[in-house]
Image (tube, helix red, strand yellow):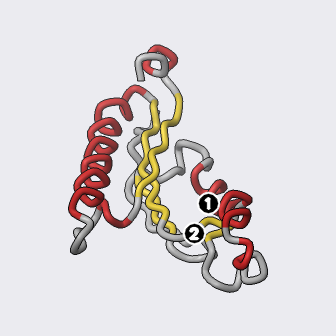
Amino acid sequence: MRRLAPLGRGTVIFTGASGSLRGRPRFAAFNATKGGLRLLVQSLAREFGPQGIHVAHAIIDGGIEGERLLSRMPDRKEKAGADGLLNIEAIAGQLLAPAQTAPQRLDTRDRSAAVTRSRSSRRAG
């Protein structure tokens, strides 16, 4: 943020999981850290949004159809696209949307990378 603030523009995207929104048994530490990250993003968005910096939290729930997952789990390669893997290009398209239209929070949960958008942290002007 120290480097972006003087420029008056930029984008910082943090990724998380639905654990940032609700707790689950045996996931207390994970939920607490993801919830803390979500609150950090909200604070940064409110602080730096007026300075032209877009800060977003992307909730990515599920396996991403990419080289890393498919190389570690070759049996999923035959099922890719059919078993609910998230489409990497669709996620990237949403995350890299122009800052004036990009959401402050992005949820991806299915192959189509459908989103739940929250108001952008960036102000017009």
What residue type is disc 2 on?
A: Gly
Q: In terms of image quadrants, where is residue 110?
A: bottom right
What residue type is disc 1 on?
A: Ile
Q: Position of residue 73 (x, y in %)?
A: 67, 70
What label sits on residue 91 in the rendered view?
1
Q: Nearer the viewer, residue 81 or 12?
A: 81
Q: Nearer the viewer, mark 2 or mark 1?
A: 2
Q: Secondary structure at mark 1?
A: helix
Q: Residue furthest right?
A: 78
Question: Residue tagged by mark 2?
Answer: 63
Please give left or right for residue 91 compared with residue 59 in the image.
right
Q: Nearer the viewer, residue 21 or 96?
A: 21
Please give left or right for residue 5 compared with residue 70 in the image.
left
- State how far apart marks 2 and 1 are (Cα): 12 Å
Please give left or right for residue 105 compared with residue 95 in the image.
left
Q: Position of residue 93 (x, y in %)?
A: 66, 56
Q: Nearer the viewer, residue 97 or 100?
A: 97
User: Count of labels shown?
Assistant: 2
Q: Position of residue 94 (x, y in %)?
A: 59, 57
Q: Secondary structure at mark 2?
A: loop
Please give left or right for residue 22 compared with residue 2 in the image.
left
* Residue at left offset 44%, top offset 60%: 59
Q: In terms of image quadrants, where is residue 14?
A: top left
Give the answer, above or below, for where 11 lies relative to 108. Answer: above
Q: Position of residue 78 (x, y in %)?
A: 78, 81
Q: In terms of image quadrants, where is residue 34?
A: bottom left
* Residue at left offset 26%, top offset 66%: 27
Q: Residues within 10 Å of mark 1 (few under 14, many from 20)?
A: many
